[in-house]
Image: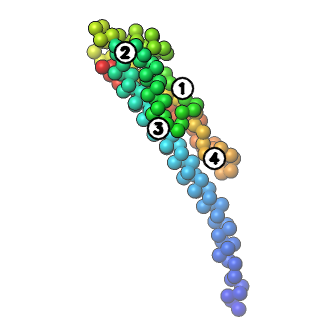
Amino acid sequence: MQKKAQRGVATVEFSFLLPVLLLILLGIAQFSWLIFNFIIVTHAASVGAHQFASERGFSTPYSDTVSSVTNALGPIRTGISISTSVNGVSCTSDSACQTALGTMANSLAAGSTVTVTIGHVFNPLYSGSWGSLGSIMPKNITSTMTEVAQ
């Protein structure tokens, strides 16, 4: 008699537990997507800074840097902003960056730095209100890398 009274108890318990398990699973996926985006943006900034630091004497330092950053971003190329600077002075064109970096004959002062900053608009996997997973994620990911110019 007792076995008949307990039929379906596991199903009821599972139905209570299922939303919690789904929320945990979606949270893990959302956080993993955030970490993936952060790693890609940080790596792209590092690649860009390394490229930009070695562009002294070349005619297209800004274009080369933007190209290498874009290639390093891989699948998240949309919603990005790239800014470069030499010794804290922003340069946003090939001619401005070429002047700031100098030539092989006219080198920069020792310890001169170049900086590449990448901003990325983060698009969460789940932006709905279910469980507020989208609301706890950052809206933008920014990474700045600085290297000594060569």
| Residue 72 placement (x, y as % from top left) | 45, 33
Q: Is residue 125 left or right of residue 108?
A: right
Question: Which residue is found at the position 35% from the left and 10% from the top?
Answer: 102
- Residue, disc 1: 81
Identify the residue under disc 3.
Answer: 40
Query: Do the residues bearing badges 3 and 2 touch, measured as CB atoms within 8 Å?
Result: no
- The residue closer to the viewer here, 131 or 43, is 43
- Counting labels gives 4
N-terminal of the pair, mark 2 or mark 4, is 2
Quick one: label 4 or label 3, which is nearer the N terminus?
Answer: 3
Query: Residue 25: percent from the left, percent from the top?
Result: 57, 56
Instruction: State the mark number for residue 58.
Output: 2
As measured in the structure, the alpha-carbon distance from the residue carrying label 2 to the one carrying label 4 is: 44 Å
- Looking at the rendered structure, the secondary structure element under dot 4 is loop
Structural distance between the alpha carbons of marks 4 and 1: 23 Å
Q: Amino acid at mark 2?
A: Phe
Res. 113 in view: no
| Residue kind at label 1, given as amino acid type | Ser
